[in-house]
Image (cartoon, rainbow, N blue to C red):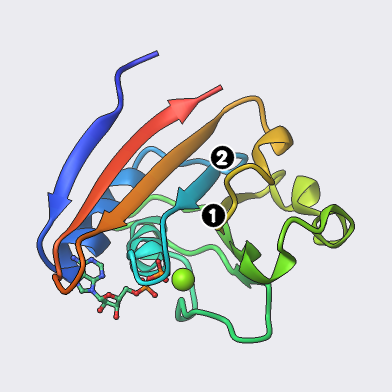
Amino acid sequence: MADPQRATLDTVEDTENLGRALAADLRAGDLVVLDGPLGAGKTALTRGIAAGLGVAGRVSSPTFIIARAHRPGTRPDGSAGPALVHVDAYRLAGDLDELDALDLDTDLQHAVVVVEWGRGVVEHLTERHLRVQLAREPESDVRTAVWEWVG
Ligand SMILES: Nc1ncnc2c1ncn2[C@@H]1O[C@H](COP(=O)(O)OP(=O)(O)O)[C@@H](O)[C@H]1O
Ligand SMILES: [Mg+2]
């Protein structure tokens, strides 16, 4: 397994661009686990992943919805992309029954699944997953990302 990769992300655009770059290697069945505190850029990164996959619909931080499905579209290189299921597991607070009810196994048959706050909760769904850890300095726009395939 390769060593973790790292990047410094000075602006929100940098974070979205990292998401775009990561998306180029993502296929249906891939699980992405995003870790990091509130405001670290998990949703911004997911917005970039969505753009890189070419899926439909705006990516937002859902207030009441736990999972949002984005229909497949066309990747920036013109090839057909997979669907995206974007999960914010914050409100699940580790509730495994509720997680089970989301039926992410079924989603993984045709979609990339990205889970904010998913660390320690969803890794069992696939043999391996892409873990992205985001961190922020207080009172700064600078974020750091560390990512690797784990499994
Ligand atoms: N370098 C950066 N990367 C990501 N977000 C940034 C950056 N600099 C500032 N921001 C801002 O920080 C916030 C990140 O929010 P969000 O992506 O929703 O975080 P999370 O989903 O981790 O809670 C946004 O308001 C965004 O505009
Ligand atoms: Mg978020």
The residue positioned 68% from the left and 73% from the top of the image is 66
First in sequence, mark 2 or 1: give its number.
Answer: 2
Front: mark 2 or 1: 1
The residue positioned 38% from the left and 30% from the top of the image is 148
Answer above or below: position of 150 versus 12: above
Within 10 angstroms of label 1, few (less than 14), some, or many (20 or more) residues?
A: many
Residue 13 badge = none
User: How far across and how far down the image is residue 146, in percent?
Assistant: 29, 39
User: How far across and how far down the image is residue 122, in percent?
Assistant: 68, 44
Of residue 84 and residue 99, the one placed in the foreground of this image is 99
Answer above or below: position of 59 versus 108: below
The residue positioned 27% from the left and 47% from the top of the image is 145
* Image quadrant in which the N terminus is located: top left
SS type, badge 2: loop
Q: Which residue is mark 2?
A: 30
User: How far across and how far down the image is residue 123, in percent?
Assistant: 65, 37
Q: Is mark 1 within 8 Å of ligand 2?
A: no
Total marks in image: 2
